[in-house]
Image (cartoon, rainbow, N blue to C red):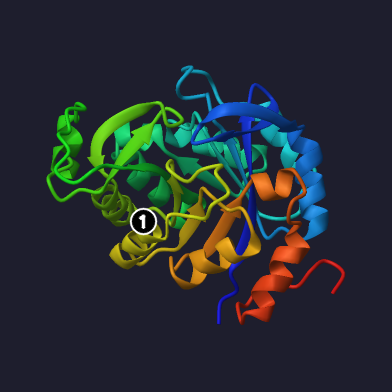
């Protein structure tokens, strides 16, 4: 049986790791390289490093920071934020990343997923989906580009995709977009619920389950972890292949070793701790 991965997330804004609640109320959480080294030593299976304002600020990706982080870790590193093209993917891989994550750029031009996956392999390409619940029968007036018109929300839609670090609604249905991203060659989907993000009350299990059932590629659960049982529920009920968290790790509430022990006790296969 494949092991389930435990992944700390480093949201970076202008060179510092930050953490917010539902994508706002941001506070400082430390230096990315120092945290990366710490999590590597603590037994994290992977790291996700996201520049959360690169796209909204129309700013270039921080290659130097990625190089510094990659020098501190010996586990897979996924980098996202401001990734707009195949050349950006190459720059990140050359800087030391193992995978890159598309979000805003993939919505603007879905073909970039196919181009990047064909050039570098789907195992390198992650598509991040920031989704927010909508009420039944909600009127959706966010403009939808003609290139993704068939992904537009309708009366049956329950989650809308947001871009620019959760600042901009797209009018796109999250489930439709998940299926399209997988069809275009994404190797994984990083699914974040904007409703539960940073609230420490648990992941949006329904969102995770619906997307997991819609695609055949791995799903990384994100947004809402507050205790080890939340990660267990994301795996068992949300059918996630990996669980990502920030607050519980950054602020020392539940260390990685504690989370792995909890999952093991409940029959979830996880990778050994470093000292084992």
Give the number of marks.
1
- The image quadrant of residue 130 is top left
* Rendering coords of residue 143 (x, y %): 19, 26
* Rendering coords of residue 38 (x, y %): 82, 48
Q: Is residue 150 left or right of residue 195?
A: left
Q: Nearer the viewer, residue 193 or 86?
A: 193
Q: Is residue 216 above or below residue 98?
A: below
* Rendering coords of residue 156 (x, y %): 15, 51
The quarter in which the C terminus is drawn is: bottom right
* Rendering coords of residue 249 (x, y %): 71, 49
Q: Is residue 117 above or below residue 83?
A: below
Is residue 271 visible in the rendered image? The answer is no
Q: Is residue 139 left or right of residue 4?
A: left
- The image quadrant of residue 135 is top left
The quarter in which the N terminus is drawn is: bottom right
Q: Residue at x 19, y 29 (%)?
A: 145
Q: Is residue 158 above or below residue 268?
A: above
Is residue 34 visible in the rendered image? The answer is yes
Q: Residue at x 75, y 43 (%)?
A: 251
Q: Nearer the viewer, residue 213 or 60?
A: 213
- Furthest residue in direction right, as rendered: 275
Q: Which residue is mark 1?
A: 207
- The image quadrant of residue 273 is bottom right
Q: Nearer the viewer, residue 57 or 30?
A: 30
Describe the element under mark 1 as helix, strand or loop.
helix
Query: Crowding at label 1, few (<14), some or many (≥20) Cα neighbours within 10 Å?
Result: many
């Amino acid at each position: 049986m494949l092991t389930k991965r435990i992944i700390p997330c480093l949201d970076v804004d202008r060179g510092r790791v930050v953490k917010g609640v539902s994508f706002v109320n941001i506070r400082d959480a430390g230096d990315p390289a120092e945290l990366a080294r710490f999590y590597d030593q603590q037994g994290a299976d992977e790291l996700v490093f996201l520049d959360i304002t690169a796209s909204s600020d129309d700013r270039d990706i921080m290659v130097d920071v990625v190089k510094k982080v990659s020098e501190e870790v010996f586990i897979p590193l996924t980098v996202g934020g401001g990734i707009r093209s195949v050349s950006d993917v190459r720059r990140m891989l050359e800087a030391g990343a193992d995978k890159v994550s598309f979000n805003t750029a993939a919505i603007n031009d879905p073909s970039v997923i196919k181009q990047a996956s064909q050039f570098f392999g789907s195992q390198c390409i992650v598509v991040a989906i920031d989704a927010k619940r909508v009420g039944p029968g909600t009127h959706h007036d966010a403009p939808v580009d003609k290139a993704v018109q068939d992904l537009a929300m309708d009366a049956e839609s329950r989650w809308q995709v947001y871009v620019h670090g959760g600042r901009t609604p797209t009018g796109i249905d999250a489930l439709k977009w998940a299926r399209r991203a997988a069809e275009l060659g994404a190797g994984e989907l990083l699914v974040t619920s904007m409703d539960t993000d940073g609230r420490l009350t648990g992941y949006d299990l329904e969102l995770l389950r619906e997307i997991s059932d819609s695609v055949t590629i791995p799903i990384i659960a994100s947004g809402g972890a507050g205790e080890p049982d939340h990660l267990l529920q994301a795996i068992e009920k949300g059918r996630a292949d990996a669980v990502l968290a920030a607050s519980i790790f950054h602020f020392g509430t539940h260390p990685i070793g504690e989370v792995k022990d909890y999952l093991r006790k409940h029959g979830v296969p996880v990778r050994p701790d470093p000292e084992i």
